[in-house]
Image (spheres, rainbow, N blue to C red):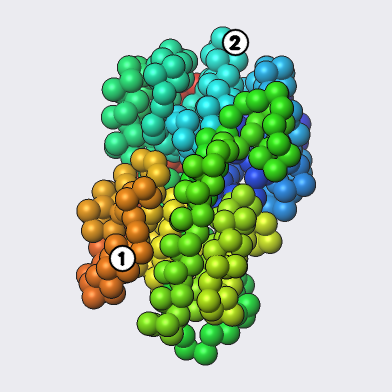
Amino acid sequence: MRGSGSAVSGPRVLLVGYNGANNTGAEALLLSDIADFLHVFGPGVSLTVPTLNESNLRRYVTEGAHLRIVPISPVFIRPVMRLVASHDLVVLVEGSTYMDTWTSALLWYFLWATRCATSRGIPCIAYAVDAGALSPLNRRLVRRIASATDMIIVRSAAAAERLRGWGVTAPLHDTADNAFNFAPRERDLDLLSRLWPRHGRPVVGIAPVDFARWPVVIRLWGGKESCYRWPYYFSHSKSRSAAADRMARMLAAFADWLVESLGAAVALFCMEELDQPMAQRILSMMRHPDAAMTFSAQRLDASQMTAVLRSLDYLVTSRFHAAVLSLRASVPQIAIGHDLRLPTLYADLGIRDEFFLEHRAVDLDVLQARFDDMRVREVELRRRLAEGHAAHAGRAAQNRLLLARFARQAALRTVE
């Protein structure tokens, strides 16, 4: 710990997450978490953010005396060991921490950071994260390694129950996702109307995911088109390609139906840069592509994407944070999901049975029927969403209180 006379006099905190991927949700979470750590530890804190893509991260995080960006290798074993050893507190900040839906490698990254910290006696916490589906091997790893974590804060009661069910014995608190209190900049609030005048047409957002590409797997070699970043490759097969094509055709037909039946404009959201091929495929299959516009996290930051999401009339989403970030505006929505995050959120909001659809079971007729039902029940739904947002925002506000209490118990210097 540095002396009080230095510019950086507080704890050195390592924020381990999914940073620099041009992912709106991860960006909103990281910015919210940084605000919490500055609030608790004051301007003397030293924050380190490791990333696979430094240039992407610098789009929305400013490096300075109290925050530094550190590039990290995809083969992360030694780099993580060195980073952990030079910090006073290690914090897991990625929402999808204890799950292998996207890739086991990301889970192992978080568990390795935990293991490096706890083996050295360095405090380690998970900060408003989630727990989802895991393979039997990964459940055993989480049970053994996560149990040594000093404190785990998860963003739902269901996530806490999953961890307990796997045998995790670390102190657990369930609150809510930190992005529930993310606020866009004032100048971005009318961004949709400035970027895309629609002359009174309703705007329906679609935030798709190419489910067939996941999980990312580790390979020594593979086709260039399926390489995420060596040695990580997207899943690929003829059946997966056919499933992706069916989903794109259904969403394109749905978008055309919105244009023809509602006179709507369709906003295609790429909540992560990796969603762009699917959005482009949908656009290319539409009969009315002139009635659609793409909004991508590659070009718009979290503030801008959030402002556009909150300007929608309706939303159909496969991205968890499109649902979360739009909720403050009570945007009526339907989810098409493939893991436990969206059904858990919709269950908490009391709308799972009506408005969550499993991606393997949905077809155009079902989606149209649910959309019609949503419009009929719009007033009631907006009320339920407003109440749900208020409850989640209140629980999310507890995160920094839990952080401050933990910091005092761990004898980390705070502003109090």
The reply to whether residue 192 is in sight is no
Is 357 displayed left or right of 318 in the figure?
left
Residue most extreme to the front: 238
Mark nearer the viewer, 1 or 2? 1
Mark number displayed over residue 120: 2
The percent coordinates of residue 361 (x first, y second) are: 32, 50
Element type where label 2 sits in the image: loop
The percent coordinates of residue 348 (x first, y second) are: 27, 49
C-alpha distance separating marks 1 and 2? 56 Å
Residue in the image at 28% along x and 29% along y: 161
Is 262 displayed left or right of 354 in the figure?
right
- Graded by Cα atoms within 10 Å as few (under 14), some (14 to 19) or many (20 or more), the crowding at tag 1 reads few
Element type where label 1 sits in the image: helix
Residue in the image at 50% along x and 49% along y: 242
Residue in the image at 26% along x and 48% along y: 347
Mark number displayed over residue 357: none
Residue wearing tag 1: 365
Height in image: 19 above or below 83?
A: below
The percent coordinates of residue 247 (x first, y second) are: 46, 56
What quarter of the picture does the N terminus occupy? top right
**Callout 2 amino acid:** Arg
Tell which circle, 1 or 2, labels the residue nearer the N-terminal end. Answer: 2
